[in-house]
């Protein structure tokens, strides 16, 4: 058993990829790392063993810069190689190899995955797993401890079902899906490479009821959840099945932790929904929509392609394609800041002794924020 940390000891240097938690591959040649990053590097014989932040990387590690704020760390880094934009290449120290790419952060993502791929699949079923005889499980799939796979479920090739997860009757998982611990999936069809994080709930009843003289009558929720390829659903998020239609999550979309998707909602391709956002029933998000944290969308809306919904927005009307909105009720960004500025001026004018001009100095900043 490892000794407990000394409370008087200095904090450990930040590192990436602790071997206790993350599978490691490599070392890799500089040329292979540059190829993974989609960049170009000098012809140098250099073997690299891992990734690390600029401030702690050593001569056998790769780091990256994607924000000018960290230029001092770049200029002082000891990293063996650094992934940078072409306009930052000259700032890379002589002892480090510059891997030049137009998209450093994307390059970093690919290089980090090169050194830390997913752990190898352990095909087969844990002895404590419960798999109904009528379920179809590909022999290459991994079924973890205490996982449950019910009748008529179909588990595709190379799927990984985490400990305690429940796959309901008739659920279909395409190839290479990963279902996190204690997640539950019912009334759903998943495409390929879908990742459901721990604790997520997919396919439960939508929130539907009809009033009667004696109370509420629950409306049967008879739709499904369709999750297309390459979607990720964050921990403890919930996606309700449709009432009569289907709830659809478009290919490539990313849902953060603690997101609520109501019944009959339809997300287009590559939508991003940030933590604690909620989307009410039958609302449609077209492709590439972004919804920031704690935003709330009422039902039966249409949010146009590439629209962006700001944090804590209350969206009660359709949003045009490409629009940016803020506030509650949501307003176009420029209008929102105009109203904020007007309220500041009004409040300043009502203060005793004010000449009514207090807060006017905020105008350039407010206007700049809306440009």
Image (cartoon, rainbow, N blue to C red):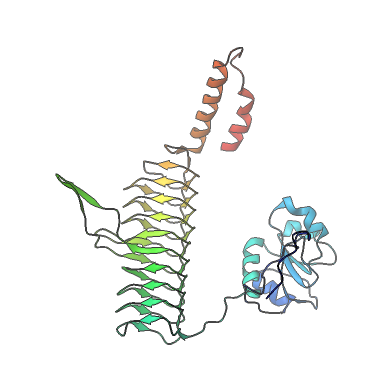
Of the pair 307 and 227, the residue shown nearer to us: 227
Picture coordinates of residue 316, whole percent (x, y): 37, 41
Quarter of the rendering occupied by the N terminus: bottom right
Whether 75 is drawn above or below 150: the answer is above
Does residue 368 appear in the picture of this structure? yes
Residue 98 appears left or right of 300: right
Picture coordinates of residue 53, whole percent (x, y): 72, 62
Of the pair 133 and 43, the residue shown nearer to us: 133
Residue 254 appears left or right of 61: left
Q: Residue at x 45, y 70 (%)?
A: 194
Does residue 103 appear in the picture of this structure? no
Q: Residue at x 52, y 82 (%)?
A: 121
Quarter of the rendering occupied by the C terminus: top right
Residue 231 appears left or right of 185: right
Quarter holding residue 170: bottom left
Of the pair 82 and 38, the residue shown nearer to us: 82
Total residue callouts = 0
Q: Residue at x 45, y 65 (%)?
A: 231
Whether 355 is drawn above or below 35: the answer is above
Whether 149 is drawn above or below 370: the answer is below
Whether 41 is drawn above or below 136: the answer is above
Picture coordinates of residue 38, whole percent (x, y): 65, 69
Quarter holding residue 108: bottom right
Residue 8 appears left or right of 237: right
Picture coordinates of residue 24, whole percent (x, y): 65, 77
Of the pair 233 and 317, the residue shown nearer to us: 233
């Amino acid at each position: 058993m490892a000794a407990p940390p000394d409370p008087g000891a200095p904090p450990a240097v930040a590192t990436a990829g602790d071997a206790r938690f993350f599978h490691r591959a490599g070392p890799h040649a500089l040329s292979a790392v540059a190829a993974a990053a989609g960049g170009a590097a000098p012809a140098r014989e250099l073997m690299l063993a891992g990734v690390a932040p600029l401030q702690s990387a050593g001569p056998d590690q790769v780091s990256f810069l994607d924000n000018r704020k960290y230029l001092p760390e770049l200029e002082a880094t000891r990293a063996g190689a650094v992934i940078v934009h072409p306009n930052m290449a000259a700032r890379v120290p002589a002892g480090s190899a510059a891997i030049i790419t137009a998209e450093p952060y994307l390059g970093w993502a690919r290089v980090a995955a090169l050194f830390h791929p997913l752990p190898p699949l352990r095909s087969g079923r844990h002895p404590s797993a419960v798999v109904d005889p009528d379920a179809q499980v590909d022999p290459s799939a991994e079924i973890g401890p205490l996982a449950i796979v019910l009748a008529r479920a179909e588990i595709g090739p190379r799927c990984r079902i985490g400990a305690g997860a429940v796959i309901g009757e008739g659920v279909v998982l395409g190839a290479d899906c990963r279902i996190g611990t204690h997640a539950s999936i019912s009334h759903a069809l998943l495409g390929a490479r879908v990742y459901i994080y721990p604790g997520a709930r997919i396919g439960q009843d939508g929130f539907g009821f009809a009033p009667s003289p004696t109370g509420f009558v629950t409306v049967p929720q008879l739709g499904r959840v369709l999750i297309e390829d390459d979607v990720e659903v964050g921990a403890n998020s919930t996606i309700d099945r449709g009432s009569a239609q289907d709830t659809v999550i478009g290919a490539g979309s990313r849902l953060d932790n603690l997101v609520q998707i109501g019944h009959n909602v339809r997300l287009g391709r590559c939508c991003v929904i940030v933590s604690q956002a909620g989307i009410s029933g039958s609302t449609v998000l077209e492709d590439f929509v972004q919804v920031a944290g704690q935003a709330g969308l009422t039902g039966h809306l249409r949010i146009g392609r590439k629209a962006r919904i700001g944090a804590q927005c209350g969206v009660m009307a359709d949003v045009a394609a490409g629009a940016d909105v803020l506030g509650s009720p949501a307003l176009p960004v420029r209008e929102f800041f105009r109203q904020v500025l007007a309220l500041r001026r009004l409040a300043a004018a009502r203060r005793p002794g004010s000449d009514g001009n207090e807060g006017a100095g905020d105008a350039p900043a407010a206007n700049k924020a809306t440009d």
